[in-house]
């Protein structure tokens, strides 16, 4: 799934992912390589005080390899909603219009001011008669803003993705994903949980992070209420197993690799019966020499955007 723009297909293997907010822009540059880990040459978060997005693009997207490289923009979480709806029984050409009509009482902003797309929810063996869709309603003004930034500055700009699909791209690197894996990405005040299997997104859930009130924040990195978070994770894995009639999830991977995450891994291991580990970029990418990686939430999402496989259905 994505908001796509018709472009001539590129075959260089390079892709650039970019997400921009009010204060900073994150950009990742990846070369996809057959039979080898992807090559990561840039993954950074750049303050607008230091460099404007326009300047960042002109500086980093240049040279014969990158000038025409495909570019994935990512829409901010505040500018779209992802919901499940029953698939309308209409021809494919009418699907978006029919889903837009279904969303009129579901999304929190006027549906007339949205751009709509959808992709399939995997079928449930227990509800064979009902087909569901993941429906995305994005603010049209936010889409126009991304297009305005990238259209004339990144010649290969071809798609706008959502963070959930960027995380799905990251999860496909995990060996556990063949059987199914849960990936938890931490932001400052929320965590995004996804469950995928063989490249397919089954479950996505945004979890607000509750803060512990029994600690001294000056002496610990772990300010997250692990017990409450573990309960929300358990509910999601239980739903995956029961609704889709799948075997139990065994593995939970948490990103980014930072002190808060490592402390959370330790705390969660006492709360939930899963194999829990940290997402190590160096385990799944060949990282170019002498680059500094920043995979806090914006950087992580840009990295996932740069992993988009244009040969696969989204």
Image (cartoon, rainbow, N blue to C red):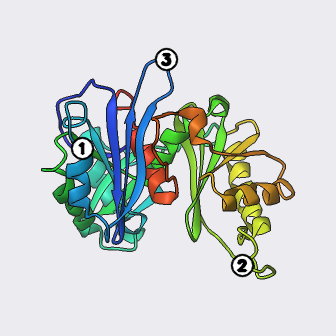
Numbered disc 3: secondary structure: loop
Measure how far apart labels 3 and 1 are at the Cα level.
Answer: 26 Å
Question: Where is 45 relative to 223, above or below?
Answer: above
Residue 108: % across, % down: 40, 74
* Disc on res. 218: 2
- Disc 1 residue crowd, few under 14, some 14–19, many 20+, Cα 10 Å: many
Residue 33: % across, % down: 42, 23
Query: Mark 2 vs mark 3: which is more N-terminal?
Result: 3
Q: Nearer the viewer, residue 214 or 62?
A: 62
Taking the image as shown, residue 227 lies to the left or right of residue 33, namely right
Residue denoted by label 1: 61
Name the image quarter holding the C terminus.
Answer: top left
Q: Nearer the viewer, residue 8 or 101?
A: 8
**How many numbered marks does the figure carry?**
3
Q: Quadrant of residue 262?
A: bottom right
Question: Where is 45 relative to 129, above or below?
Answer: below
> Residue 246: in sight, yes or no?
yes
Residue denoted by label 3: 35
In this view, the residue farthest toward the top is 35
């Amino acid at each position: 799934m994505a908001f796509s723009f018709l472009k001539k297909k590129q075959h260089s293997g390079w892709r650039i992912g970019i997400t921009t907010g009010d204060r900073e822009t994150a950009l990742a540059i990846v070369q996809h390589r057959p039979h080898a880990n992807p090559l990561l040459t840039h993954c950074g978060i750049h303050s607008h005080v230091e460099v404007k997005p326009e300047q960042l693009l002109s500086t980093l997207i240049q040279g014969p390899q990158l000038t025409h490289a495909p570019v994935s923009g990512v829409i901010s979480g505040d500018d779209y909603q992802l919901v499940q709806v029953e698939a309308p029984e209409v021809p494919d050409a009418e699907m978006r219009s029919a889903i837009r009509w279904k969303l009129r009482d579901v999304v929190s902003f006027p549906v007339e001011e949205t751009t709509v797309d959808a992709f399939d929810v995997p079928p449930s063996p227990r509800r064979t008669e009902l087909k569901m869709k993941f429906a995305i309603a994005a603010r049209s003004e936010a889409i126009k803003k991304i297009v305005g930034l990238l259209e004339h500055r990144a010649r290969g700009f071809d798609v706008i993705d959502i963070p959930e699909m960027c995380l799905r791209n990251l999860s496909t690197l995990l060996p556990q994903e063949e059987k199914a894996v849960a990936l938890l990405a931490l932001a400052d005040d929320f965590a995004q949980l996804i469950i995928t299997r063989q490249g397919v997104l089954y479950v996505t859930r945004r979890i607000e992070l509750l803060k512990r009130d029994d600690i001294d924040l000056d002496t610990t990195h772990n300010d997250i209420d692990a017990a409450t978070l573990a309960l929300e994770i358990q509910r999601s894995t239980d739903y995956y197993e029961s609704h889709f009639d799948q075997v139990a999830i065994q593995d939970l991977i948490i990103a980014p690799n930072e002190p808060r995450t490592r402390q959370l891994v330790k705390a969660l291991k006492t709360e939930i019966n899963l194999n829990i580990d940290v997402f190590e970029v160096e385990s799944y990418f060949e990282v170019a020499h002498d680059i500094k990686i920043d995979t806090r939430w914006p950087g992580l999402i840009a990295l996932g955007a740069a992993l988009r496989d244009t040969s696969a259905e989204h």
